[in-house]
Image (cartoon, rainbow, N blue to C red):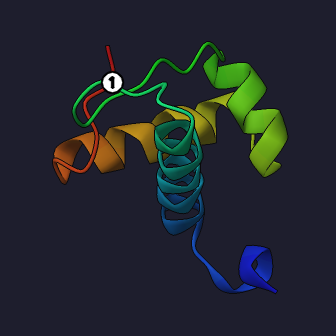
Amino acid sequence: VAMGRRSKTAHLAHLICELFVRLQAVKKTRVMSFNLPLSQAELADVLGLSVVHMNRVIGTLRRMNVINWT
């Protein structure tokens, strides 16, 4: 249900938050960050997006200051 109801931007934001909470539970985060060893292409596959669309979604979250992608 959540996949169909959320925008792609919200879906990626939710995925990042979910990963953070799960990694925090096993003490694999640093302050408010964590390593995400996935490429944009791999994330695009996870969310069912093209690589170009994934890049735009990441850009949107960056402009909103929701994520800092380095």
Whole-percent x, y for residue 6 in the image: 61, 78
In the picture, residue 23 is in which quadrant?
top right
Q: Residue at x 58, y 44 (%)?
A: 19
**Numbered label tally:** 1
Q: Residue at x 59, y 38 (%)?
A: 54
Q: Amino acid at mark 1?
A: Trp
**Along the viewing direction, whichever of 18 and 44 lies nearer the viewer:** 18
Question: Is residue 44 shown above or below 34?
Answer: below
Question: Is residue 2 shown above or below 35?
Answer: below
Which quadrant of the rendered structure holds the N terminus? bottom right
Which residue position is annotated with label 1?
A: 69
Whole-percent x, y for residue 57 in the image: 47, 47
**Along the viewing direction, whichever of 29 and 55 lies nearer the viewer:** 29
In the picture, residue 7 is in which quadrant?
bottom right
Q: Residue at x 72, y 22 (%)?
A: 41
41 lies left or right of 9: right
35 lies left or right of 31: right
Q: Residue farthest to the front?
A: 26
**Along the viewing direction, whichever of 43 and 30 lies nearer the viewer:** 30
Which quadrant of the rendered structure holds the C terminus? top left
Q: Residue at x 64, y 15 (%)?
A: 39
60 lies left or right of 68: right
**Along the viewing direction, whichever of 32 and 39 lies nearer the viewer:** 32
Whole-percent x, y for residue 64 in the image: 19, 54
